[in-house]
Image: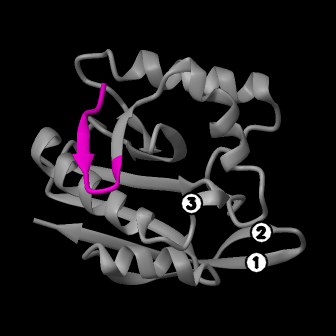
C-alpha cells in the first residue's frame, strides 16, 4: 500500500520481500558513508527490515522507514529517525539511500521533499535535520534542493580508515 504517491515513485512501508534490494542498495562504496547502518549480510538486512515493520505499527514510533518504489521496483529507502525523544519531541532526523540503478535521476530530491512534508504534518515537527560527509556533494545538493539549510560543519566528527572526516549538518525548520 502506498502511503505517499508522487510523480514517478511511491513511498510505502517496508515488506519482507524488500530485504535483498535493501541490502544491495547499501553495498556499494557511495552508500557506506560511515554513519548509516550498513548490514553486512542478508540476515542482518532481514533483521533491520523486520524491526522497521514492527516500529511503524507502534503508536509512538522511534523511527518510520519507507521503501522508495519506482515502476514496482525497490529504488531505495528513506527514514525519519529519533522521534518522540524526551525533551526534543519536536525534532526528527532524516536518512536516505538510493539504489545504484536509480541514482542521478532526481529521485532522492523528490523523495526528501515528500518525506519532509509528511514528517512535519504527521509528527508536528518544528525541526527536521540530516547530515552528510563533506565529500558527499551529491547528498549535500539533494538536501539543498529540498530546502534544507547548511547549519555548519562538524570537523573531525568521525575517524575512519585512518582519517578524520568532517560532516555537514543540514536542517529545515518551521
Q: Residues within 10 Å of mark 3 (few under 14, many from 20)?
A: some
Residue 87 in view (yes/no): no
Whether tag 1 and tag 2 are in contact, CB under 8 A, the answer is yes
x%, y% of residue 123? 16, 40
Residues under labels 1 and 2: Cα distance? 4 Å
Instruction: Name the residue beneath numbered marker 2.
Output: 159
Instruction: Name the residue beneath numbered marker 1.
Output: 164
- Name which of mark 3 and mark 2 comes first in the sequence: 3
- Name which of mark 1 and mark 3 comes first in the sequence: 3
Q: Secondary structure at mark 2?
A: strand
Residues under labels 3 and 2: Cα distance? 30 Å
Instruction: Indicate which disc residue 174 carries.
Output: none
Q: Secondary structure at mark 1?
A: strand
Quarter holding the N terminus? top left
Question: Vertical placement of 40 versus 54: above or below?
Answer: below
x%, y% of residue 103? 57, 66
- Name the residue rendered at 58%, 29% in the picture: 18
- Total of numbered circles in the picture? 3
Asked whether residue 3 is drawn in magenta, I would say yes
Instruction: Name the residue beneath numbered marker 3.
Output: 102
Q: Of residues 53 and 34, which is closer to you in this image?
A: 53
- Name the residue rendered at 70%, 59% in the picture: 34
- Name the residue rendered at 42%, 84% in the picture: 152
Q: Of residues 41 and 84, which is closer to you in this image?
A: 41
x%, y% of residue 28? 77, 58
Question: Vertical placement of 166 versus 118: above or below?
Answer: below
x%, y% of residue 14? 46, 28
Name the quadrant containing residue 10: top left
Whether tag 3 and tag 2 are in contact, CB under 8 A, the answer is no
- Name the residue rendered at 42%, 36% in the picture: 65
Q: Secondary structure at mark 3?
A: helix
Amino acid at each position: 500500500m502506498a502511503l505517499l504517491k508522487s510523480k514517478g515513485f511511491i513511498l510505502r512501508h517496508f515488506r519482507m520481500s524488500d530485504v535483498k534490494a535493501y541490502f544491495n542498495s547499501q553495498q556499494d562504496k557511495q552508500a557506506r558513508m560511515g554513519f548509516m547502518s550498513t548490514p553486512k549480510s542478508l540476515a542482518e538486512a532481514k533483521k533491520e527490515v523486520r524491526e522497521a515493520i514492527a516500529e511503524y505499527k507502534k503508536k509512538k514510533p522511534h523511527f518510520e522507514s519507507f521503501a522508495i518504489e519506482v515502476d514496482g521496483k525497490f529504488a531505495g529507502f528513506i527514514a525519519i529517525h529519533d522521534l518522540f525523544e524526551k525533551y526534543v519531541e519536536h525534532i526528527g532526523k532524516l536518512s536516505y539511500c538510493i539504489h545504484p540503478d536509480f541514482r542521478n535521476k532526481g529521485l532522492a530530491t523528490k523523495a526528501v521533499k515528500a518525506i519532509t512534508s509528511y514528517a512535519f504534518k504527521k509528527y508536528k515537527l518544528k525541526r527536521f535535520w540530516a547530515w552528510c560527509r563533506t565529500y558527499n556533494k551529491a547528498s549535500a545538493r539533494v538536501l539543498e534542493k529540498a530546502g534544507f539549510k547548511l547549519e555548519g560543519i562538524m570537523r573531525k566528527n568521525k575517524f575512519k580508515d585512518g582519517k578524520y572526516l568532517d560532516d555537514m549538518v543540514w536542517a529545515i525548520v518551521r
